[in-house]
Image (cartoon, rainbow, N blue to C red):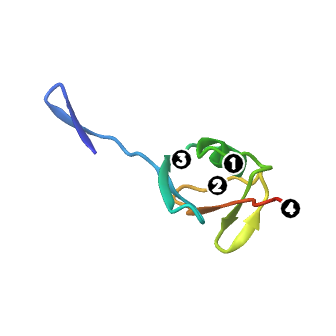
């Protein structure tokens, strides 16, 4: 992304992670920031750690795990009932 400021171009880099919510057909891109955790991602897509789990590279991850720039995250909503 380029912006013009004072007659000069300034390059702006926006880092994102791709989030896919399984079973709902929803895919989102969230802005990545240093220290971003699984719990942060769940909150940003409308879940909490009791209503969904996350998977990175095929493995279920804990809520306090930090997410690296560009990492795809799958969110799996928890289904309960009787």
Dot 4: within a 10 Å radius of its alpha carbon, few (fewer than 14), some, or many (20 or more) residues? few
Contact, mark 3 vs mark 2 (Cβ under 8 Å): yes
- The Cα–Cα distance between marks 1 and 3, rounded to whole angstroms, is 10 Å
First of labels 4, 1 by sequence position: 1
Dot 1: within a 10 Å radius of its alpha carbon, few (fewer than 14), some, or many (20 or more) residues? some
Residue to which mark 4 is pinned: 82
Q: Nearer the viewer, residue 43 or 22?
A: 22
Q: Residue at x 34, y 41 (%)?
A: 12
Residue to which mark 2 is pinned: 67
Horizontal arrangement in the rendering, residue 39 relative to residue 45 (left or right): right
Q: Is residue 24 above or below residue 9?
A: below
First of labels 3, 2 by sequence position: 3
Residue to which mark 3 is pinned: 32
Horizontal arrangement in the rendering, residue 36 relative to residue 15 (left or right): right
Contact, mark 4 vs mark 1 (Cβ under 8 Å): no
Q: Residue at x 66, y 48 (%)?
A: 42
Task: Residue 74: give x, y in percent of width and height.
Answer: 61, 63
Q: Secondary structure at mark 4?
A: loop
Residue to which mark 1 is pinned: 37
Dot 2: within a 10 Å radius of its alpha carbon, few (fewer than 14), some, or many (20 or more) residues? many
Q: Is residue 39 above or below residue 60?
A: above
First of labels 2, 1 by sequence position: 1
Task: Residue 66: give x, y in percent of width and height.
Answer: 70, 52
Contact, mark 2 vs mark 1 (Cβ under 8 Å): yes
Return the mark for residue 59: none
Question: Residue 10: which quarter of the image?
Answer: top left
């Amino acid at each position: 992304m380029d912006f013009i400021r004072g007659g000069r171009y300034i390059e702006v880099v926006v880092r994102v992670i791709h989030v896919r919510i399984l079973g709902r057909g929803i895919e989102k891109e969230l802005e990545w920031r240093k220290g971003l955790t699984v719990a942060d991602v769940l909150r940003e897509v409308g879940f909490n750690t009791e209503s969904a789990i996350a998977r990175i590279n095929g493995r279920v991850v804990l809520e306090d795990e930090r997410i690296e720039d560009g990492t795809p995250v799958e969110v799996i909503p928890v289904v309960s009932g009787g």
